[in-house]
Image (spheres, rainbow, N blue to C red):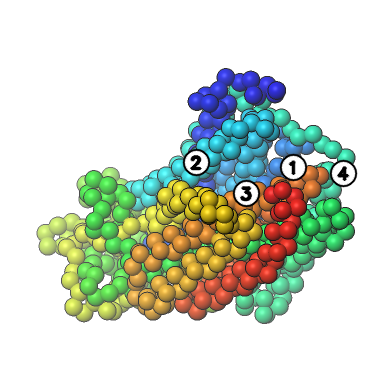
Amino acid sequence: MSATAQQKPAKGHPSGLFSLFFSEMWERLGFYLMLGILLLYTIDTERGGLGFTNAAAAEIYGTYMAFVYFTPFIGGMIADRLLGYRRSVLIGGLLLAAGYFSLGIRSMPTFYGGLVLLCLGNGFFKPNISAMVGNLYAADDPRRDAGFNIFYMGINIGATISALLSAPLRNLWSFNMAFSAAGVGMLIGVAVILFNWKQLADADRQPEVKPGDFGLKQVFLIILAPAVTFGVIGYFVGGKLPFIMDTIGPITFGFLVGMLPVAGYFANLVMKAGPDEKPGLAALIPVYVAGGAFFMVLHLSGGLITIFAEHNTDRRAEWVPQATEFYAQKAMPSYFGNAGPDLPRPDERTLYIVPDRTEAMFGARILSASAVAEIRADAASGVAVVEAGAADFDGTFACRVFPDANVALSTSKDAHGVETTSVKIEPEQTDALGEVALVRQVDGRTVPVIMVGQGTFDAVYRDAAGAARLAPGSYVRLLNAELLTGFLNPFFVVVCTPIVVWFFAWRVKLGKAVTTARKIFLGMVITTVAVLVMALGAKVGQDGAVKTSMMWLAGYYLVITFGELCLSPMGLSLVTKLAPKRLVGLMMGGWFLSTAVGNKLSGFISGLEPGTTMFVVLAGAILLVAGFIFVMLPRLDAAIKKYGA
């Protein structure tokens, strides 16, 4: 019996389980908090965001998601061969905290640097804390499955709380404050690990390296080096091909080209395998395809579905109690562009028409000194500039003021010709001259003023001829988009898991058990239905011409959660059971790589318009994957039976 099994149990489980539970809970809270608002932060032009085009933001999102799922493959092997699990988890936690705090600073270097730190940190943290949970139990310990269930409960708790935390943080303060809060949470997770360092010693047992096992050197030379070489070549070649530039872009093209030698290696591995290993390895190919396709859709949650929720969904929240109204944000002018005439519009006197470049600066909460001077010189407007600390200063719309020479604006267009202007400070460390807000006297009251361009102003009132006007200083209250995209899925996972478990147990009692392979097929079919729900929602909304009910998003998440519960738990389990023992680590890496490819494609899809045609085409693609799995069912079932999976 191992020393672990001799630990004094906590509620029937090894005492180290609950420290790992809380560390994972805090890590997942930070991960999903950041994921829920990352794309919103990059595309936002009204609440202090970066002002990227949807396509550019989606490219960043997809690339981040690809590498955040790729690095655990390497991080797990480094822990196995070099660092051990505790040190790897500690290093990963510190890198993650540093990444979140970097995102908490509004600058381009800290933004991109923060994403890199998060990818590296996740690589060290994610695979190794799960390995530590497994090491707490002997291989034949009957408490093992229950222990993992408790551990995964921490994941769902963290994911559920993340949206409930991020919304008030950015409503009351800013995007950057929400990112920083994720960093604080991660430091709490690190503190839990350090506080229980000795207690976790027995969980830090590295696996025995056997002859024939893949080492780090082999992985780098045989898999990573060719992938990087092909990827770099693909990026530069793609940048010179008009077709690639006009479709998927050089980054996505380079990533996919980089995956070719990896896919070739795994295919060669299957072809050269002996008769005892070949059926299991071959059966993993459809598992990888299904996993990549499923996560491509699921992780649209932080991309395309977030854009749909932000721009095309009626998020009015008059029903939110006043005591918790920090869960509702003020509707900014762009929200009214496709709103119906039944929605009251802002009083025209609370908007101030300015040049487009000034509108962009105001949206970034940055103003140049000359812009402030122009506003002060426009006495006829009745708009006053008040300094921070003044009695009528409204911090909600406060802008930092910088010298003109340090305020840089850059304009870019998306595939539809829509211009977006981003604003940044150069150099980033430039000190602000001060902080100001704009106010105007309206009906004897001092009210804050929002600066808008002429195009935005016209869009607000375009379909509002008979619409009522809000009282000056009043706002339409909206649910944050991340409350829809970040809360519903983990909530439905918690609610629907007992239903799915009961259903499959009921089928077993009837003598009609659903095989593991058929669960994967069923998961893909359900995922297709979920995408079709979004297609119907987009159709009802006339492809963004009018806003649609939040119920379409709720329906989508309810359906895809059932697909997730059928498919996702099967993936990693089948990898460990179908792969030869000497190749389990490598084939687990194949699962992560297939997920990474799916995530990169998810980023590409997120750069498209969330319209009916796009969702129908996506549903067709997922249905084709489901058809492929259906054709492969006999081989999958045979392999699973052969290896006792």
Q: CB atoms at circles 2 and 1 under 8 Å apart?
A: no
Nearest to the observer: residue 550 or residue 29: 550
* Amino acid at the residue labelled 2: Met
Q: Which mark is first along the chain, 4 or 1?
A: 1
Front position among marks 1 and 4: 4
Q: Position of residue 548 (x, y in %)?
A: 35, 70
Q: Residue at label 2? A: 153
Q: CB atoms at circles 4 and 2 under 8 Å apart?
A: no
Q: Which mark is first along the chain, 4 or 3?
A: 3
* Amino acid at the residue labelled 1: Met
Q: Residue at label 4? A: 212
Cα gap from disc 3 to disc 2, whole angstroms: 23 Å
Nearest to the observer: residue 303 or residue 128: 128
Q: Residue at label 1? A: 77
* Amino acid at the residue labelled 4: Gly
Q: Position of residue 288 (x, y in %)?
A: 68, 59
Q: Which mark is first along the chain, 3 or 1?
A: 1
Q: Which residue is depicted at the point 70% across and 64% down?
A: 634
Q: Is residue 122 visible?
A: yes
Cα gap from disc 4 to disc 2, whole angstroms: 36 Å
